[in-house]
Amino acid sequence: MKSQDIRKKFIAFFESKQHQAVPSAPMVLKNDPTLMFVNAGMVPFKEFFLGQKKIVNSRVTDSQKCLRVSGKHNDLEEVGIDTYHHTLFEMLGNWSFGDYFKEEAIAWSWELLTEVFKVDKDILYVTIFEGDKGEGLERDHEAYDIWKKYIAEDRILLGNKKDNFWEMGAQGPCGPCSEIHVDIRSAEEKAKTHGAELVNMDHPQVVEIWNLVFMQFNRLADGSLEDLPNQHIDTGMGFERLCMVLQGVQSNYDTDVFTPLIGALEAKTGVTYGASEEIDIALRVISDHVRAVAFAIADGQLPSSTGAGYVIRRILRRAIRYGFTFLNQKEAFIYQLVTVLSDQMGSYFPEITAQKQLVMNVIKEEETSFLKTLGQGLGLLDQVIAQTKGKEVSGEKAFELYDTFGFPIDLTALILSEKGYTLNESDFTTALEQQKNRSRAAAEMDMEDWVVLKEDPEQEFIGYDYLETNVKITRYRKVTSKKQGTLYQLVFNLTPFYPEGGGQVGDRGFLESSNGDVLHLIDTKKENNLVMHIAKDLPKNITDTFKAVVDEKHRALSNNNHSATHLLHLALRTVLGTHVEQKGSLVNSKYLRFDFSHFSKVTPEEIQKIEAFVNARIQEKLELQEFRNIPMQEALDKGAMALFGEKYGDTVRLIQFGNSKELCGGTHVSNTGNIWHLKITSESAVAAGVRRIEAITGEVAKDFFTQQDKALTEVKQTLKNTKDPIKAIVNLQDENAALKKEIEVLLKEKAKNIKGNLKANIETIGGVNFLATRIDMNAGAIKDIAHELGGEVENLFFFAGAENEGKATLTSYIAKNLVEEKGYDAGKIVRELGKYIQGGGGGQKFFATAGGKHPSGLSEAIAKVKDYL
Ligand code: ATP
Ligand code: MG
């Protein structure tokens, strides 16, 4: 069965059990402080398990893109070495939000595998949670008894907390789980070792394919467990592993998910998969990593030097480095695989096809620049080797290469061993650990559990219509970090505060208690659907009714910039073309920033057109038209730009100003006239094919123009109140150039005169033309004079002392033939005479200089020169 059909059948099976099929959520998480990427199918549904979002449909099925390269789930180092862990993989899932539980979950997994997919029962094992004394948890007898109905009891194995108690992270929803494993070894192998002994033992052909998680607890900050309000089912089946089983192969890389990618790599590099372990690993690494990187970019995460962007960059670099070392690829090539990927996966994941060109450009540029780094690194490594005494290269030096140039440590070690050197790896590890500890200490955050004052499953956001209202605090918690000290996060039963999101900063404002006490709210953020208001303290009477008031000015300025961003987007698509797509944005009360796909610099003429377009829309005073809580399809029908990245359960909000129609959750002006004016302040590149525009509006633009005007007035005044400052400046520039030329001519004449005078003072002593004198000019000019004199006067022995800007210099010039015949040494002379000016210097035997800080010693130095003759 083809992989495409396997995915379809899975989804169709659960649709037949009344599940709603939903698309994969984006893999990149934008507003989650606890996680960078979706690392399991349950992540997009967290809020449902926590009871923080209203359930629309209690049964859902999907195939979710997951990435396990950082944090609690990190498989990166295994990937490519083994044959069944990937960075990006698809997790097939069926979900029950407070609906069915263990009975159905187990029955349906069995039905799907053995009846629909016809997997041989004799290759299956299942595990159940054996219980854990420390946690006070009993064995999962219930799951055992259900499994007994389907599978022989000797195939039901007990598993410990590590394998059979699933947790998303250090905190959050969790529960016991039951895994399904396959044993796809040959009959011969099976005869040697019993499959049951190999379950959960990292055997490449006895692997877990499906995990059924019975969500029933929430792990608190102090490590204890509390019951969730409802019981849920969360299952995750590795799509690529399922394909391996159903296609009768022994490795995920032999399924049709990977063979097209590996085939393309073979064709490109001329190697054959299966020829050698080293090459095989490289092919697996690259075919795996290109998927992760391509989808991350398509989901909006560009490679960069910090945070999630850096994780993506590191994955790509790992692939490049394998290609460089083992496939001998010295030029960008990985980006070409995106075409194969898009052909193969585009039907289920349309984002990869829609963004193909951008993804290719970004990968290609990253490859090119890292290959350059590798080249430079090789050069630096040669230098390090040259400076190394003995055969062991310092771990700190290797760390420097790694840290500053991104030069991979395994590559350093490999090259060193090829050259007969070893690397002090423990020093390297120490340096790495020290750096990690430094950044960990800086980022460390201590988050206490929520103190719940009032259960409130649905907090209402009223900030589109109101800027103040009476509220009750429903929960709060204390968060302490090095960076920000102690802060409190407060949740209200309803709120007018806009939480940071969609590029727009959070609102600030204050809480006023019934007796008039005021508590400032410095920021607003959102986590798992909860709007959290951030304060430095708690209010005195926490159960009081408070007036919550948004800072109106801050909000209004942000509104200006957000609405202007929409107009800017439309302007860019109108002026530059419809290839322009938003790649990121930032909106605060001071300015706006907009990143978009476009392949060349935006010219000054285009910038002017873009500004003019936006300002015309501002002058038209377009009314805001807002459509709240409408289904996606309706928004599309109204002409909203199709976006990837909406999550299941979200209805959308459409914001329209004239022809600008965008899906957006942010806050906006009621009329574009409020924006007053848009002024673009900069245009630059962010990555290959991604440009960035920064702009200001409203009051900030007014201030900007006022400042500009003031500066211009001052310029005019300085230019004697000219009416035409540009002409005046051009005149000044011309005049300045003419003066410079004149000075040059004068200086040349002066030097000629000096030379004439000097020549007249030369003494001839024993065949040597000797001159020791004082010339107060700069060192460069004296050098010129010395060399010119030397060209005109033979057998010259010239010495000059000079004072220039409070410092003393000595210059000694001796004709080369004198140096040879008489053994004179200009370097020695200036070194020795340097003591008179409290300085030192040196140079060659025929020319040398010294500098010092004691000009009053010059005459003594000059007087001593004759002694050297
Ligand atoms: P393993 O022990 O094999 O690493 P896991 O216990 O980490 O698996 P879960 O977190 O339970 O796996 O994820 C559910 C399913 O997702 C697994 O049964 C497996 O089929 C699949 N899976 C997990 N990690 C990966 C990965 N890195 N690459 C491909 N599939 C994976
Ligand atoms: Mg794992």
Image (cartoon, rainbow, N blue to C red):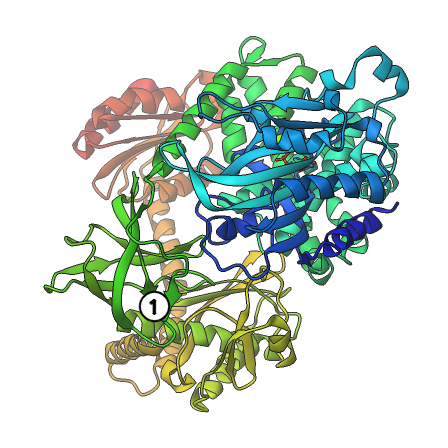
Q: Is residue 115 above or below residue 191?
A: below
Tell me the element at label 1: loop
| Residue 747 image offset from top left, x and y in percent | 36, 55
| Residue 76 image offset from top left, x and y in percent | 63, 33
Q: Is residue 305 visible?
A: no
Q: Quadrant of the N terminus?
A: top right
> 193 or 813: nearer the eye?
193
- Quadrant of the rendered image containing residue 571: bottom right
| Residue 581 image offset from top left, x and y in percent | 61, 67
- Quadrant of the rendered image containing residue 332: top right
Left or right? Give the position of 547 relative to 103.
Answer: left
Q: Which residue is mark 1?
A: 589
The amino acid marked with disc number 1 is Ser
Q: Is residue 773 visible?
A: yes
Quick one: label 1, few (<14), some, or many (20+) residues within 10 Å?
Answer: many
| Residue 767 image offset from top left, x and y in percent | 42, 24
- Quadrant of the rendered image containing residue 223: top left
At horizontal 53% and vertical 17% (from top left) the residue drawn is: 387
Q: Is residue 268 above or below residue 609?
A: above
Q: Quadrant of the C terminus?
A: top left
At horizontal 62% and vertical 13% (from top left) the residue drawn is: 421
Ligand 2 quadrant?
A: top right
Q: Is residue 618 above or below residue 415?
A: below
